[in-house]
Amino acid sequence: MNKLITTSIFLILFNNLLHSQEKYTLSGTISEQSSNETLIGVNVLFPEVSKGVVTNEYGFYSITLPEGIYQLQISYLGFQDIIQTLNLSKDQKIDFQLEETSEMLDEVVITEDVERINIKNPQMSLNKLSAGTIKQIPVVLGEADVIKSILLLPGVTSGGEGASGFNVRGGAADQNLILLDEATIFNSSHLFGFFSVFNPDAIKDLKLYKGGIPAKYGGRVSSVLDIYQKEGNSKKFHINGGVGLVASRILAEGPIVKDKGAFLVGGRSSYAHLFLPLFDIDNSAYFYDLNTKLNYKINENNNIYLSGYFGRDVFNLNDSFKNVYGNSVLNLRWNHLFSDKLFSNLSLIYSDYFYGLELDFVGFEWNSGIRNFNLKYDFKHYISDGFQLTYGINDIYYHFNPGEIKPNRDDSGITEEKLIDKYANELGIYFDAEHKISNQLTLQYGVRLSNFIRLGQDELNSYENDNPVIFDAQTHNYSGAEPIGITTYKRSDQIKTFTNLEPRVALSLAFNDETSIKASYNRMTQYLHLLSNTNAPTPLDVWTPSGKYVKPQKLNQYAVGFFKSLQNDSYSLETEVFYKDIKNRIDYIDGADLIANDAIEQEILNGEARAYGLELLLRKNTGKFKGWFAYTLSKSEQRTPGRTPVETGINNGAWYNTPYDKTHDISINSSYEYNDKWKFAANFLFQTGQPTNYPSGQFVYQDLIVPIYDGQRNSERLPSYNRLDISATLTPRKNKNRRWQGEWVFSVYNVYNRRNAASINFSQNEDTRRNEAVQTSIFGIVPAVTYNFKF
């Protein structure tokens, strides 16, 4: 009898043990209640067991826990929390909709997440901004701007005022991968850097990866700027926009099929050129762009999206010079849910950058560009609450048009000529795991296998000893070698193939819920190169692929950081130190000719680069007064030593400052909500002046004084850069009682009218006949006013 009782008790306990170990999965999609717009990065938390997950780029979440009754908390900055009791006794699929905390004109502000779960997340060197944050930052001419906003973050600088592009942790502008709905943007600026190509009204999510870059990204060695557009409101029709002094924008969204499909169409245009004829000026400069997106929910497991962007810049000078350039992208995507633990996204992407130039007084037109076709298939596998796996494949086919010149009128003396087109294919296969080892230790590790094939082209020069650049030991000068022959290839031929393994690893060691240290290592490879001998990219710069004479750039980056949440998340502190080295960074021989050159390999050498520094970011996250203080101390250098003991190399083989080296970089961003009617914001920036070259002497030639530049490269600097911007936003209280809502934004750029040097040139004064330094400044003080609206 006792034996029977003992056996029964054992079976009951064993059954209970099995039952207690049973695990179930909770999954679903989280969206905004008013529009059905899915939300990225929403925290789905189970505080009792310190478990949680965040939604992916399409609002999907999945978490697996032991059977039990839990307190579920869903939180997202700018929205009301959802707190409810959940009985997890079976697999459940539950969609949640979040309600905004208040109806305001501004987009919901999604800044860097300060939830405690992020203290333990191994992802580091990541910054996030939203359209609402961007709109609150004062910028030149009063137009909200993505690129100008990220320049306020630590580790991010510009090539100068009015310059296009941006530099991250001492890297070049062409080393940034810029994505809009997964499509590559090759030129991120309008009007040579005065505006960015991104319409803030259409932006849903923005992430800037400076390090710790996940394995799903490849092809660049400095950073990834990943931007997603809004999907559109599937509940009701909605319009918002803004009217400024030099540009206006409008965005419309609404349902195609209510609660199942939606559209979004947005446009921007500048119009300052329309007023130039009033001043008897024939010149003009303007831009326009279009954002569009369609989405449709087929069923609970399938969604399709079609998104696009088209933008153009137009310059006219007295009808004798015309310049047109811009980006075009298109992306067709299919989201499929295989199970409550396996999410997939299939994308077919087209991207094109075009540059056109017409010189009527010379009688020719020129066009060049780069286009690619990209097939991506990504998977997110929620294997357990402590282990998630991301994996996929990405294949890109490139077509490079280095340039084509042809006459544009009958009496032109120009002969039609086409530079040789280039072709390439880049394949990437990756996997990335996030592994929670314990409550204190979390790892993120993965690897990317990249393969780049330089495909056949019509003609390719061959050189003695495969050396397109020769060195003169007597004059210590480099010059292009004479080709000894020409090889013709079929398109399917493989001129050169590169294969690289790119491991990624990051870890987070949490001391408690408020403090952690993180570390990361990245190896990345870049197969495309931007040919430019200017400090900042210009529309005329040409992209070229790696191949027989141009090696791919290879990066190793190391970073360690300390992260602290203060006063119950009211403040947060992030500090990081980083070091990175880059092999095969291209450098230019003295007097390099990069324009319309069909033998560009004769002008470049392969060198190396390195950058290291410290970043600090202190945020105030709550209250009427919010903002951040960012400081970066860094160094960025490069060198190209001689290939043989006889050669001197570039700059005598010594390290020299890159054009984007900034020793000190300080930025302060602040906003103050005085009441529901008035908001105020301010920025302050200070940067060490960018490196440059000053003449070391002069000589007289035919009664002209000519400066001599024979010193070390980039050994001098422009004066330091500093600027203060302020803005005030007026939101009428009557907005609350009507559908049409508006606000006025009054801003002043460069309040104390500092004339920051964009460049310093040396030329002969016509009166004194002496060489003198002439400083060029782009902006002084610029007041502006913008009216934003929505209905």
Image (cartoon, grey):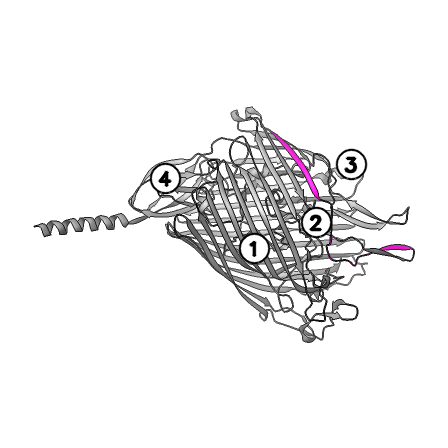
Check residue 486 in the rendering and tell me which mark sits there, or answer none.
none
Q: Given the current orientation, which residue lies at the most extreme front position?
A: 511
CB-based contact (under 8 Å), mark 4 and mark 2: no
Task: Magenta stretch: give its range.
Answer: 703-729
Q: Which residue is mark 2?
A: 690
Can you give x and y, in whole percent of width and height, for residue 724 in the image? 67, 36
- Label 1 crowd (10 A; few <14 / some 14-19 / many >=20): many
Q: Please identify, in this view, whether the residue under mark 4 or under mark 1 is nearer the observer.
A: 4
User: In the rendered view, does 489 fall on the left or right side of 100?
Assistant: right
Whether residue 557 appears in this view of the structure is yes
Which mark is first along the chain, 1 or 3?
3
Can you give x and y, in whole percent of width and height, for residue 635 in the image? 64, 52
The amino acid type of the residue labelled 1 equals Tyr
* Measured Cα–Cα span from mark 3 to mark 2: 38 Å
Q: Quadrant of residue 390?
A: bottom left
Q: Which residue is mark 4?
A: 72
* Measured Cα–Cα span from mark 2 to mark 1: 36 Å
Helix, strand or loop at label 4? It is: strand
Q: Which residue is mark 1?
A: 350
* Measured Cα–Cα span from mark 3 to mark 1: 41 Å
Which mark is first along the chain, 3 or 4?
4
Check residue 278 in the rendering and tell me which mark sits there, or answer none.
3
Q: Please identify, in this view, whether the residue under mark 2 or under mark 1 is nearer the observer.
A: 2
Helix, strand or loop at label 3? It is: helix
Helix, strand or loop at label 1? It is: strand
The C terminus: image quadrant: top right
Q: Nearer the viewer, residue 373 or 540?
A: 540
- Label 2 crowd (10 A; few <14 / some 14-19 / many >=20): many
